[in-house]
Image (spheres, rainbow, N blue to C red):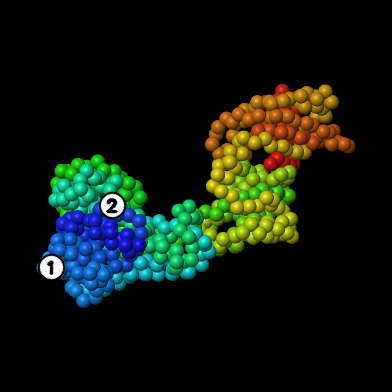
Amino acid sequence: MESTMYGAIQALPSEPVSDLLSIGVCPFCILRFFGIRDVVYSYPFLPSTLVECTTINLSKEPCNKKEQESFGHSNEQALDGRTCNNVSVNFDMSNPCIACLGIFQLEPGIDRQLDRICHERRERMAVTSKEKIIESVKKEGYQFDTFTVEISIPGIVMVRERAVWQHLQEKHGSQSRLQGKHLSEHVVSSKEALKGALIKSLEESLQAVHDSGSTFKIALRYKHPETVCELGFPGCSLKRKRGVMNEVNGDFTEPVESLVAIQRCLASISAKDFASIYPYPPPKCAVACNLDVSCYRTATLIGGRYLKFSRNISQSPWMIEEERKGDGSVQEIIADVVFPHFKADSYKFHASGREDIDVRMLGGGRPFMMEIVNARVLVSPDDIQKIEDSVNSLKEGWVKVRNLQLVGADARSSMLEGETEKQKQYTAVIWLSRCISNDEINDFMALKDLQIQQKTPVRVLHRRSPLVRPRMIHWLKLDRIEGTEHYYLLHLCSQAGTYIKEFVHGDLGRTYPNMACGGSLVGAFLARNLKITP
């Protein structure tokens, strides 16, 4: 890597590099502005090597072999002027870089020995970030074998990069390395360079592999206190959506929308207009960016099917005026077993439709999914099987689960589609106002794919929109319960989302047609079981 880094730096034009160093651009940003990528950003002696190479090239006479071999390893020369053959390069690191605002040089100005400060500062940047990351990971107790890094940069850094680039184009635009180049295409972004500098070191320290698709995220958020002030120029303000000011410590949280607005503004503004509203090169700043590190895991999804055997258990907690209805809920019974295994922040329970509290859920079971938020623990398929067994062994026996497994994000969309697209079978005990003949029973059973129109039922009108919903009754069957005249067993297959109770009694005519059509028959719904075929 050292030879690759040295060759890349040797090929840089000396005059623009010297100019950038003299106005306060750090060596890492200089490499970015000249489009140098790959792993060179993780080399600890990169700043001193850049300065020495520039000094030698400007002298037009190569230094002796001993000097070349000492690139990045000398401790004795002053930071302010590195000299070779009476040619010096001014390089002031007492202030943060005017482009990145110190993102690549944490804790600036502590020491003024070039090699030592560059090496220690580079090490300090990586170690400081690593220490914060490792501390955050250990504090929360995350388990992971892969990770990805997310980086947030203050909007003002993008503006300052534009100002430095405009300075380069105006003063050194004739250089072959700069001629005809565009900022967005040529300059390496701060995020890309930071990842190049940190990822290899993090992989070694965390003993994990970097994977952009990993569910475990390490978020690095760089903030700068003067961002709001410097972004106050016309056309690039935060008028669309303001960030949040923390009243305790005065930190400004910049919204994502503002960063997009800044990018759009900088892409559309001409060089002339930009020069009229923002200085270039940008002014020096005494305050560097500071770094916040946080870790989190994207949602872990557990899917399966549940069966409900109690007629006094709702699907989710049911509270009316702070009073619980029923003996519990499917959600709580399952979550009380599943959730503790993940040591997560919270969870959300999703299901493909819902049954009424007094309806048992039989057959193949209703599809459901638990969305575990920020889980610290990774679970294996064996762990999932143990969780399923634990739910099914609860002594009450009100709820059981089957086919419990880890699922992907696409499972939720397919589950929600099932709310309206699947057919569902019901078995219900109903009461009819008179004894019906076998011919009438056969007439009911002859109905196939009956289209009905259902207005929102009166019983749920307080919480659902007043709409007319077309639904399909695919088939039905009536069996007279022996020893009675008015009680029947109704077997029915309908489109998902059909209100079965209302189809039986008509809901004051709000469901039409219904089993009580014509006025000579009154129906009442007594009990129901639901079966869903997988």
Q: Earlier in the sequence, mark 1 or mark 2?
A: 2
Q: In the rendered image of this protein, does residue 349 appear above or below residue 201? A: above
Question: Is residue 387 among what the camera can see?
Answer: no
Which quadrant: the C terminus? Answer: top right
Picture residue at 66% right of the left edge, 48% below the top: 305
Query: Quick check: 69 left or right of 276?
Result: right
Residue 525 percent across, percent down from the top left = 73, 37
Quick one: 110 or 3, which is closer to the camera? 3
Under mark 1, the amino acid is: Asn
Picture residue at 61% right of the left edge, 36% below the top: 420
Query: Quick check: 286 left or right of 405?
Result: left
Picture residue at 49% right of the left edge, 55% below the top: 214
Question: Is residue 180 among what the camera can see?
Answer: yes
Q: Nearer the viewer, mark 1 or mark 2?
A: 1
Cα distance between the residues tagged 1 and 2 = 29 Å
Residue 378 percent across, percent down from the top left = 57, 61
- Residue wearing tag 2: 35
Q: Residues within 10 Å of mark 2 (few under 14, many from 20)?
A: some
Q: In the rendered image of this protein, does residue 415 appear above or below residue 344? A: above
Q: Determine the residue located farthest toward the front in the rendered image.
A: 65
- Residue wearing tag 1: 85
Residue 451 percent across, percent down from the top left = 65, 26
Which quadrant: the N terminus? Answer: bottom left
